[in-house]
Amino acid sequence: MRYAAPTTVDEARSLLAEHPGSRVFAGATDLIPQIRAGRPAPPVLVDLKRIDQLMTVLHEDGQWRIGAATPTSNLTRNRDFTAMFPGLSEAVGLIGSDQIQNRSSLGGNLANASPAADSVPAMIANAVQAVIASGDGTRTVPVAEIATGPGQTSLADGEFIVEFTVADPPSNTSDAYLRMIPRTEMDIAIVGAAVRLTVDGDIVTDATVVLGAVAPTAVTVPEAGAALVGAAIDAGSIDGSAMDTLADAASAACDPIDDKRGTVAYRRQVAGVMARRAAAIAVGRAQNGV
Ligand SMILES: Cc1cc2nc3c(=O)[nH]c(=O)nc-3n(C[C@H](O)[C@H](O)[C@H](O)COP(=O)(O)OP(=O)(O)OC[C@H]3O[C@@H](n4cnc5c(N)ncnc54)[C@H](O)[C@@H]3O)c2cc1C
């Protein structure tokens, strides 16, 4: 197995074209344990962390550009980013530990395609786009279109994510992410729930609800978002019947596995609870600022 550390996107592109079946990596916090566990080693391991564009976090012209290989701790430590996307920031702040977050990347979290990946529901709720190096150019797709099943993506051999883009949220908009893990630390989610919503005074005017870890890929639940739109907010709390409908819709959208971490029935119920709690946090942030 060869190691290569290109310094430009084009150099990485050429390496991948010359050596089919090679793999890019950023933090390698997923890739190296998988190879050690017996996954076939690729001919070349292409380290993306020497390419400036993939390591940069930029805020310009009303949008963020987040290098696909930049450590997720660069997002949690970025106060402006965290103020605009508190839910996305708290999602990446749940990945592993400080040590893991100093290596782990958004690109790796997404392309590893674990149903339990913490950043993915929050990225989808915020309509984050992935810019992919493809052929001689780039193509841009919504994050929701990358993972197609556990460990499976829509990326072709030789393609890799260069950066993520996300527009500044409209005013009175905020997000929240919550997950349930059976242990208190260093475990993977049995349910993750991201909610982004917009308010106008005491009314919710827009809402997106996305669940993780309850199906082969993250699930957007339009019925749960619709339950919140038009709901009244009284003393900071969303109308209870709208929240009941949201929770029921979230539970109904689940198609979870049954394993030692939780039964299907438990995961379904927890999905409703997590979605409701995330909505309650997001509405407080949208009304009051973070
Ligand atoms: C102890 C421990 C705890 C963890 N806890 C969590 C947790 O709580 N929540 C969670 O979600 N994850 C967790 N993880 C998993 C892992 O840390 C995350 O998924 C992390 O974000 C992966 O990022 P990475 O840069 O290390 O990925 P890598 O290991 O570098 O890559 C992962 C996969 O993505 C591909 N890839 C990487 N970058 C790109 C790119 N730019 N374009 C295309 N493909 C790419 C690689 O080829 C590989 O298949 C944990 C891992 C460990 C070891």
Image (spheres, helix red, strand yellow):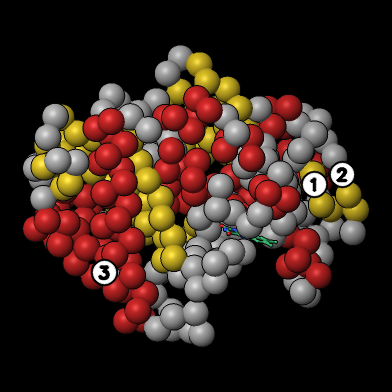
Residue extending farthest to the top is: 61
Q: Which of the labelled discs sits on residue 46, or is there none?
A: 1
Q: Which of the labelled discs sits on residue 4, or is there none?
A: 2
Number of other residues with Cα within 10 Å of mark 3, as a class: few under 14, some 14 to 19, many 20 or more: many
> How far across and how far down the image is residue 10, in percent?
74, 31
Mark 2 element type: strand
At a point 50% along the width and 41% down the height, the residue shown is 89
At a point 55% along the width and 47% down the height, the residue shown is 92
Q: Are marks 2 and 1 in contact (CB under 8 Å)?
A: yes
Name the image quarter holding the C terminus.
Answer: top left
Pointer 2 or 1: first along the chain: 2
Q: Which quarter of the figure has residue 200? A: top left
Q: Is residue 59 above or below residue 221?
A: above
User: For the residues marked 2 and 3, what is the alpha-carbon distance in whole angstroms?
Assistant: 45 Å
User: For the residues marked 3 and 1, what is the alpha-carbon distance in whole angstroms?
Assistant: 40 Å
Check disc 3 and report the residue beneath it: 251
Is 22 placed left or right of 201 in the picture?
right
> How far across and how far down the image is residue 132, in percent?
58, 38
Q: Which of the labelled discs sits on residue 12, or is there none?
A: none
- Disc 1 marks a residue whose amino acid type is Val
User: For the residues marked 2 and 1, what is the alpha-carbon distance in whole angstroms?
Assistant: 5 Å
Number of other residues with Cα within 10 Å of mark 2, as a class: few under 14, some 14 to 19, many 20 or more: some
- Tag nearer the camera, 2 or 3: 3
